[in-house]
């Protein structure tokens, strides 16, 4: 009820009367009043004027079930949202929910992660009150080999959403990082449960440093936040909603061809070190070459010094000069 009332207050340009809210949601005057009181306790500033009704004046910078539910205007991405104050990892929670039958597009968000995960067992710093730690559950009808491209689709979505909300221009470090001024502001972790030819579910986890002021010493040279780059705080719930809106659009484009054909040019235009020398580090060793952008399947094209073209599927491209090394 709180979510619906908040949404109605948000969408109304003028005062909205108690009577109108009662009729709209089929509840009593007392129920409306109680919901308004609860919202006020949570930090919403709601003006109440006799004979006119209620009007939302201000809202808190916090993420909550109601805040996300009342802001979300997407068709499917994040339409169903689960918010937690604290979890081990939103990817782990999302996987459990997916196994229990959560629908395609379900979004899991936490204010804090106790064991936020990066790739290959690395950790992801996820303190309370500062960042966006979230995972989207997807159940697409595509072959498992196409799933890893969804990391790229999400990278593009986060980049666009950050630009629209903050005006900051990020760059993509293939395949899964977003950097601003050569420091990491966002990481993406895509995990999948699949049979040989069938996907049970995919979880795309996103970590964005939004209002972080300080990082632990070990990552302080390589990490940044939107606040540190933009010199102001940003509303996390609004950014989450914007990411979901962008993701919905890009995902639908991805599904038209089930690859990056329609997104390739846009992705390349944001690729850090495009047409510059990069060092590719893989298990077998490392080599140098020029990054020439992605293929329609999301692989990174590297032109080696002898002219040979290599397609990088997995492994890590570390870029010379990036992070100061
Ligand atoms: P990654 O393996 O590419 O990056 C992890 C590395 O990034 C760490 O080893 C550390 O050096 C650095 N790092 C750790 N925390 C931060 C941070 N907050 N900001 C910048 N750099 C950091 C990237 O993995 C994928 C991260 C995905 C995180 C999301 S959060 C929601 C979801 N749940 C979950 O457990 N993981 C994902």
Image (tube, rainbow, N blue to C red):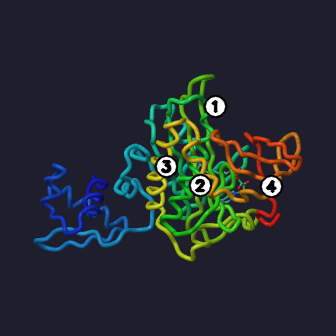
Q: Earlier in the sequence, mark 1 or mark 3?
A: 1
Tell me the SS state at disc 4. strand
Q: Which residue is mark 1?
A: 145
Q: CA distance from mark 1 to mark 3?
A: 20 Å
The residue depicted at 60 percent of the width and 28 percent of the height is: 194
What residue lies at 27% left-to-right and 70% top-to-bottom?
46
Instruction: Say which of 18 and 238 sits in front.
Output: 238
Q: Earlier in the sequence, mark 3 or mark 4?
A: 3
Apparent side of residue 295 relative to residue 7 in the rendered image (left or right) = right
Q: Are marks 1 and 3 in contact (CB under 8 Å)?
A: no
- Judged from the image, the secondary structure of the residue bearing numbered disc 1 is helix
In the picture provided, is 114 more to the left or to the right than 28? right
The reply to whether the C-beta atoms of the residues labelled 1 and 2 are less than 8 Å apart is no
For label 2, being within 8 Å of ligand 1 is answered: yes
User: Horizontal placement of 24 versus 227: left or right?
Assistant: left
Ligand 1 is within 8 Å of the C-beta of the residue at disc 4 = no
Tell me if label 4 and label 1 are in contact, CB under 8 Å: no
Residue, disc 2: 207
Q: Is residue 308 above or below residue 214?
A: above
The residue mark sitting in front, 1 or 2, is 1
Q: Earlier in the sequence, mark 4 or mark 2?
A: 2
């Amino acid at each position: 009820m709180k979510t619906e009332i908040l949404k109605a207050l948000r969408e109304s340009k003028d005062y909205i009367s108690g009577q109108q809210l009662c009729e709209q949601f089929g509840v009593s005057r007392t129920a409306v009043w109680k919901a308004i009181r609860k919202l006020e306790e949570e930090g919403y500033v709601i003006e109440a004027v006799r004979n006119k009704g209620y009007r939302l004046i201000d809202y808190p910078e916090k993420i909550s079930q109601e805040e996300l539910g009342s802001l979300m205007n997407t068709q499917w991405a994040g339409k169903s949202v689960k918010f937690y104050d604290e979890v081990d990892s939103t990817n782990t929670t999302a996987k459990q929910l997916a196994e229990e039958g959560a629908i395609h597009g379900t979004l899991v968000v936490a204010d804090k992660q106790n064991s936020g995960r990066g790739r290959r067992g690395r950790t992801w710093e996820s303190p309370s009150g500062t960042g966006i730690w979230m995972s989207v559950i997807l159940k697409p009808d595509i072959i498992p080999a196409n799933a890893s491209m969804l990391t790229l689709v999400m990278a593009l979505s986060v980049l666009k959403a950050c630009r629209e909300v903050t005006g900051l221009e990020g760059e993509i470090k293939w395949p899964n990082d977003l950097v601003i001024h050569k420091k990491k502001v966002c990481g993406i972790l895509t995990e999948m449960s699949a049979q040989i030819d069938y996907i049970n579910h995919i979880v795309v986890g996103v970590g964005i440093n939004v209002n972080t002021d300080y990082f632990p010493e070990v990552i302080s040279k390589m990490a940044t936040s939107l606040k540190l780059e933009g010199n102001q705080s940003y509303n996390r719930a609004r950014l989450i909603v914007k990411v979901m809106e962008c993701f919905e659009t890009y995902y639908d484009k991805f599904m038209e061809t089930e690859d990056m054909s329609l997104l390739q040019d846009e992705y390349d235009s944001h690729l850090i070190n495009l047409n510059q020398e990069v060092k590719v580090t893989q298990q077998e060793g490392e080599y140098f070459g020029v990054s020439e952008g992605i293929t329609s399947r999301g692989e990174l094209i590297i032109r080696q010094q002898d002219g040979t073209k290599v397609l990088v599927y997995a492994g890590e491209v570390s870029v010379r000069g990036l992070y100061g090394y």
